[in-house]
Image (tube, grey):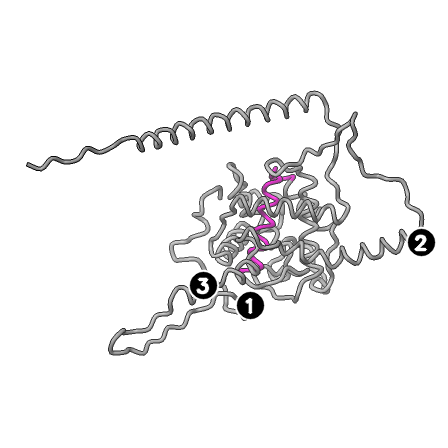
Amino acid sequence: MGNTVSCCVSPEGSPKLPRQPADRFEEYQINTDVSDDTGPYLQHISDREVPDELAQESNPSDHARASTIFLSKSQTDVELRDKRKSNHINHTSPGPISKKYSSCSTIFIDDSTVSQPNLKSTIKCVTLAIYYHIKNRDSNRTLDIFDEKTHPLSRERVPDDYSRTDPEHKLIYRFVRTLFSAAQLTAECAIVTLVYLERLLTYAEIDICPSNWKRIVLGAILLASKVWDDQAVWNVDYCQILKDITVEDMNEMERHFLELLQFNINVPASIYAKYYFDLRSLAEDNNLSFPLEPLSNERAQKLEAISRLCEDKYKDLSRAAMRRSFSADNLVGIRCSNAVLS
């Protein structure tokens, strides 16, 4: 498919999902009573909009100040784990310290930054966030397009208890890692995948559960790869990775995914940064430390060169801004001569 959306929009129009209670598409009622003065009453746009507090609380993938859903869902398990850990420490002696700390002679840094995240660590954190979504879900609201029983990804028989058994983190990680490795996707794509996943759960008012997690994750990866990567993976390429899925099924799932997102695939830098740092917080809470390596002389010289380059650019911008301000200040000294009326 590439970066175009030609497969997502057909000449006859995209097929609509059957209306279910979980659908979030609500129709605004219009009072058709005609008055003598104003005519038909139309609801004001401010009445249709959600207040800022509610919008930030319900749409963390759209508002930078709203906390991510996966981090809040993981807090329950983290608090219980910390409580058990404190009780264990009170009764046993502390073991050897495994965490690396910087010293005067050695500086440890990780190779993961917000602009260039570490691929393996990022995938582990994203799949852990998906694991907490499934484990601490509120209910089992879903849609047929994402149900693995209705639309299987393989020819293997789906177990009868597929909707009742929560997948382990290792299973989710292997599934996502296989897709990223085969399609050669980047770590940034994994973060955008999580943004789309939480946006889908919020917009469509559904839950990611054992019966639909594979197809929801696949749909989010499909969109993220096309939006983020310049050379996106086509739908037919995913059919080479998942041997038993058809292109028609991939196209249909992508259409429904976009419709449920209301075609909102924009990910601002503030949203991306928030999800990145929340993933790092999740990793720290679950002892998934990013790989630390001693700072070498070569790496230190590169960092120094990058820092000097950014500093020079900042100085050039400051000088340009000062020149513009000086030209504006000179306008103060210009006086207009009085007009002479004859």
Of residues 321 and 186, the one drawn nearer to the viewer in this rendering: 321
Q: Is residue 310 left or right of residue 95?
A: left
Answer whether residue 317 is magenta in the image. Answer: no
If the image is split into quadrants, where does the C terminus sit? top left
Mark positioned earlier in the residue sequence (2 or 1): 1
- Secondary structure of the residue carrying tag 2 is helix
Q: Position of residue 311 (x, y in %)?
A: 55, 26
Which residue sits furthest right?
92
Residue tagged by mark 2? 91
Look at the picture and state if 312 lies above or below 12: above
Rounded to the nearest whole Å, what is the CA distance between mark 2 and mark 3?
55 Å
Residue 200 forms part of the magenta stretch: yes
The residue carrying pointer 3 sits among few (fewer than 14), some (14 to 19) or many (20 or more) residues within 10 Å by Cα, namely few
Secondary structure found at label 3: loop
The picture quadrant where one finds residue 301 is: top right
Residue at the spot of label 3 = 49
Question: Left or right of 2: which side holds 306?
Answer: right
Q: Amino acid at mark 1?
A: Ala
Q: Nearer the viewer, mark 1 or mark 3?
A: 3
Q: Find residue 156 and report its image quarter.
A: bottom right
Q: Is residue 336 left or right of residue 2?
A: left
